[in-house]
Image (spheres, rainbow, N blue to C red):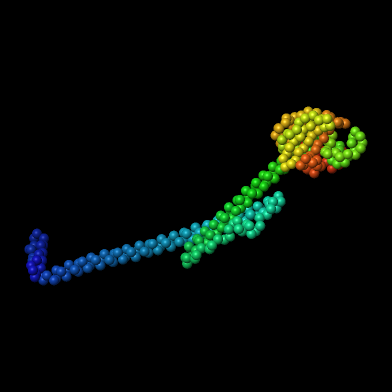
Amino acid sequence: MSKQRLNLVVIPPSTGRVKQYSLPQWIGRAVIAAAVTLVVGSLASLGLATYGLSKANRQQAQVKENTDLKAQLASINGDVAVLRKQLARLEDVEKSVRTVFGFPEIDPEERQLGVGGDGVAAELTGSPATDAAHATQAELDGLLRRCSFERNNYETVLQSLMDRKMQLDHTPSIFPVNGYLARGFGIKPDPFTGFEKMHTGLDLATSFGTPIYAPAAGRVILRENQTQFGNVVAIEHGYGIETYYGHMSRFAVKLNDVIHRGDLIGYVGTSGHSTGPHLHYEVRVGGQAVDPMKYIYDRAPEPNAPIATTGSAD
């Protein structure tokens, strides 16, 4: 290429002649610029087309993702509704248990404070899907607080029931022998003198050697022979309650034995001051003798009526 001219050499196939053209230099530059412009324009158009397609694909993917999220949120809301109903049912059951067993009810304000209220509402974002998700999250948080509060309530009720069961297990609530109620608690004629005096227990008449069963759980605190009641066993049941068994023929327990309701503790006899085979049975609360019939649920209706069978177990 000369200073002012641009030489263009055209080499044809081997059978043709080589041709040479001389052109002004500005034409070459224009051709080159046009080629560059064409290439750059083509690349820009291709980039714009690719970007537009990618944006459309992203929008389509977002639409699908939003649709899937809405479906999942609807399913979660359905589960939340079921959980809400079940939790309300559990609260009703807990209230019923408290009522049946005489446990103190939870004040509605205390329950509300324990749950913590509805909490602070989430700030609206303007996006229906996001706002719905926030609302669901807030309700789930509230339900979790209610579940935690109710779990603590059930643990409290369970402990109260266990304490109540322990107390019932240690309450002398059955007759210790099979037989007849020969003499009850209170001012009664003395069988030896005929004069009325305080009788501090029940005289349960039955055959010699009849088994005597513990009417409640406890621990043997006395096993000895006394002048008046002969062979005597005493059981400490806890809660300030003790029971005494007199006129036994034989012992079946040792001192400090831990026993349960229905365990064999001895046999009916006539030891001590006795007019015939029977069991003298006492219940003492805080050291004071009380009427055993207040504790016995299978009581005989009248003196000399047969006592319900106790058996050797609950």
Q: Nearer the viewer, residue 182 or 52?
A: 182
Q: Nearer the viewer, residue 106 or 2?
A: 106
Residue 298 position, x and y percent, is 79, 41
Residue 305 lies, with reference to residue 158, above or below; the image says above
Displayed quadrant of residue 79: bottom right
Q: Nearer the viewer, residue 190 or 302?
A: 190
Q: Which quadrant: the C terminus?
A: top right
Residue drawn at the location 23% of the way across and 65% of the way down: 39
Q: Nearer the viewer, residue 112 or 21?
A: 112
Displayed quadrant of residue 50: bottom left
Residue drawn at the location 47% of the way across and 67% of the way down: 126
In the rendered image, the residue lying farthest to the top is 250
Residue 201 position, x and y percent, is 82, 38
Give the side of residue 249 with respect to residue 93, left or right: right
Give the side of residue 127 with respect to residue 293, left or right: left
Displayed quadrant of residue 35: bottom left
Residue 228 position, x and y percent, is 84, 32
Residue drawn at the location 59% of the way across and 55% of the way down: 146
Residue drawn at the location 86% of the way across and 41% of the way down: 186
Q: In this figure, what is the number of numbered marks?
A: 0
Q: Is residue 290 visible?
A: yes
Q: Is residue 312 visible?
A: no
Q: Which quadrant: the N terminus?
A: bottom left
Give the side of residue 27 with respect to residue 93, left or right: left
Residue 192 lies, with reference to residue 141, above or below; the image says above
Give the side of residue 235 with respect to residue 148, left or right: right
In the rendered image, the residue lying farthest to the right is 194
Residue 175 position, x and y percent, is 79, 38
